[in-house]
Amino acid sequence: MEEIARLIPVLGKKNPRLAVWLVAIIAIAAPIIANVAVGRSWVRILDFALLYMLLAIGLNLVVGYAGLLDLGYIAFYAVGAYTWAFLASPHFGVHLPFWMVLPIGAACAALAGIILGFPVLRLRGDYLAIVTLGFGEIIRIFLNNLNHPVNITNGPQGIGSLDSIHFCAGDPLAAAGEGVLDALCEWQFGSGLRVGGFKIHSLFLFYYLFLLCVIGAIVFMHRLQVSRIGRAWAAMRDDELAAKAIGINTRNMKLLAFALGATFGGVSGGLFGSFQGFVSPESFSLMESIAVLVMVVFGGMGNIAGALVGALILSLLPELLREVAVPLQETLFGTVLLDPEVLRMLLYSLAMILMMLLRPRGLIPARARYARVEHVREASA
């Protein structure tokens, strides 16, 4: 609750309970307001913003809590998305329900995190960043080229017609018969929900599903942060040698951080596959890894509120910029000189430069909980 209250700076300090209720009301009403005010396309943008929040929470665990600079985080997102594509699409003719595919995707991503963790146990800082960057690129290149001599990933064309979320094994459309249970088997998230004469569009259903996932991630991370594992990560982040000296098994802690962070990436990837209905290697480039890292740094490393705010601002701002910049360029110059994607990268660069100069600890700095002298003074002030 404290972390949620920090999303509203002034009110969160004066009346945390009211701030939490306000955040909850805004989160529930956001897609309805967006649909009425600016159109349904913005509900889709909000869906993606929630996915980025989930990714930022997972990366924050690795970078912010454990102090391990990971530039290949998007590879775990790819593992989750492609697991969904293999197990819930016509590509291999397998149509497993979401409650099987999502845990399998998360487990595969966690395994990939452990595989990454073993070779980099002795690395920190720049060296770790370079190795993880290489890992992310290796995964992307594999996805790009595993289409010959046996077609596994369908190469650069990607895999389409992914199943949306459904409850029954087998082809959900072929499983339909009569009765409520059969109708439930037939129903897919992507087809929306009809209640009486009123139809709820799938974008709204996905929004509230993603919102539930983000809330679950916040609760989990909050409990983890104040546990012995969270304190061990903080000790390791601040001084690894001292952490070893007091008996913390840094090897296991690093592997756990990589595995848990990757699990968040795997779940996000699976949800992305079900939502988008299509996956291709282009969606998992290095720039996406950097974008998620910028969100975490911009918001403030080592705290949940920072990751949420960073992900929300930096996923919405480029879309706002796109709405303004393209018509403005066409009006002024008669053509589009700067592509919105270039503007997005410029925005991320500018955000990083401003943060490093003005607020090095991020928009919402992490609270002092642990043993650094300046933190103890700050906490006791």
Image (cartoon, rainbow, N blue to C red):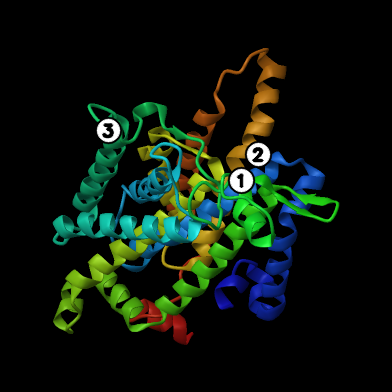
Query: Which one is earlier in the sequence, the residue at label 3 or at label 2?
Result: 3
Q: Quadrant of the N terminus?
A: bottom right
- Can residue 188 be seen in this snapshot? no
Tag 3 residue: 146
Image quadrant assignment for residue 254: bottom left
Question: Is there CB contact under 8 Å for labels 1 and 2?
Answer: yes
Query: Which one is earlier in the sequence, the residue at label 3 or at label 1?
Result: 3
Q: Nearer the viewer, residue 278 or 288?
A: 278
Percent of width and height locating residue 319: 62, 38
Amino acid, disc 2: Leu
Q: Residue at x 74, y 66 (%)?
A: 25
Amino acid, disc 3: Leu
Percent of width and height locating residue 249: 18, 77
Q: Nearer the viewer, mark 3 or mark 2?
A: 3
360 lies above or below 291: below
Q: Is residue 277 left or right of residue 245?
A: right
Tag 1 residue: 316
155 lies above or below 297: above
Image quadrant assignment for residue 328: top right
**Which secondary structure, mark 2?**
helix
